[in-house]
Image: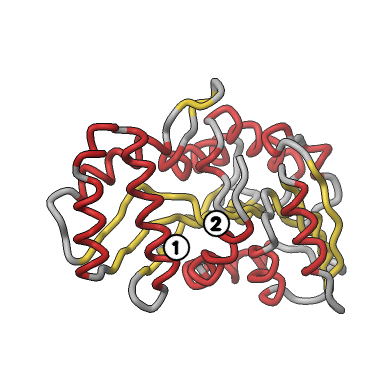
């Protein structure tokens, strides 16, 4: 599964604002005092996690960028090298990564990825990270909760259908969708890590009109795909929302998995 670079660029400011900065201090405390730090970014897209996190960590860094999509890797590689940061890329299936693939890393990170995994894939990734003995910062997993203002009687129905869509089975894979944060915590804690979880909520509205409108159409479209009966009411729902204006809290979760259960 991959995304258009235009969508990733559109969402990047909301992602950056949402990420849980109070996980940074325990993350920094868990990192080794050596340079350059070696960071593996899984599902890097065009590099938004790197752009957000690299300036919040001390010293020189070497980022190894992983993605399914060669177009996105090329864009990331072209834009992320700096005086304090080197990058290289890895093309491949993220669900097949093992501890040997993470050798030499000081940190594993990912953004908006785990809800696209199955339970088995999350368990496999957690096992690889734990065997490698490194911390993992895993941000912006969907939480399955949307709060819209003003409220509409159809909000709950669209939310439920959307969440079911995120949990759909595709190509034989039963996606976790909003169950990913709980599955991630269980996977890491079952292997002796501790997991810190914080909210990372998108705040949409007139300040981000293009993203807000694109998100609304995508949210409704996914709900209709999952529950075709909603097609009859979706056009009117969209018209009302866009005519009235709206604000939305789109709830996500950030998690920091750290070696040691204490």
Residue 83 drawn at (x, y percent): 87, 79
Contact (Cβ within 8 Å) of mark 1 with mark 2 = yes
Q: CA distance from mark 1 to mark 2?
A: 8 Å
Residue 190 drawn at (x, y percent): 55, 35
Q: Which residue is mark 1?
A: 200
Q: Is residue 52 above or below residue 94?
A: below
Residue 165 drawn at (x, y percent): 39, 36
Residue 221 drawn at (x, y percent): 36, 45
Q: Residues within 10 Å of mark 2 (few under 14, many from 20)?
A: many
Q: Is residue 151 above or below residue 25?
A: above
Q: Which residue is mark 2?
A: 139
What residue is drawn where x is 32% and y is 39%? 224
From the viewer's perspective, tell me whether residue 212 is left or right of residue 158: right
> Mark number for residue 73?
none
Position of the N terminus, as image quadrant, is top right
> Who is closer to the viewer here, 210 or 180?
210
**Element at badge 2?**
strand
**Element at badge 1?**
loop
């Amino acid at each position: 599964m991959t995304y258009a670079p235009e969508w990733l660029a559109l969402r990047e400011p909301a992602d950056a604002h949402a990420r849980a900065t109070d996980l940074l201090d325990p993350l920094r405390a868990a990192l080794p005092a050596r340079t350059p730090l070696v960071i593996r970014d899984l599902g890097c897209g065009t590099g938004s996690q790197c752009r957000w996190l690299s300036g919040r960590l001390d010293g020189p860094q070497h980022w190894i960028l992983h993605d399914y999509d060669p177009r996105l890797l090329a864009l990331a590689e072209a834009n992320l090298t700096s005086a304090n940061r080197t990058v290289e890329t890895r093309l491949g299936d993220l669900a097949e990564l093992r501890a040997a693939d993470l050798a030499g890393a000081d940190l594993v990170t990912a953004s908006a990825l785990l809800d696209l995994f199955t339970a088995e894939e999350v368990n496999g990734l957690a096992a690889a990270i734990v065997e490698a003995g490194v911390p993992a910062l895993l941000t912006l997993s969907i939480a399955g909760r949307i709060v819209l203002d003003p409220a509409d009687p159809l909000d709950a129905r669209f939310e439920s259908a959307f969440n079911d869509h995120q949990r759909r089975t595709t190509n034989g894979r039963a996606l976790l969708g909003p169950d990913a944060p709980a599955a991630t915590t269980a996977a890491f804690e079952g292997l002796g890590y501790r997991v810190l979880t914080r909210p990372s909520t998108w705040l949409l509205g007139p300040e981000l009109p293009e993203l807000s409108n694109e998100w609304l159409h995508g949210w409704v479209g996914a709900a209709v795909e999952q529950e075709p009966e909603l097609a009859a009411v979706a056009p009117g729902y969209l018209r009302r929302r866009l005519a009235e204006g709206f604000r939305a809290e789109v709830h996500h979760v950030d998690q920091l998995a750290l070696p040691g259960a204490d």
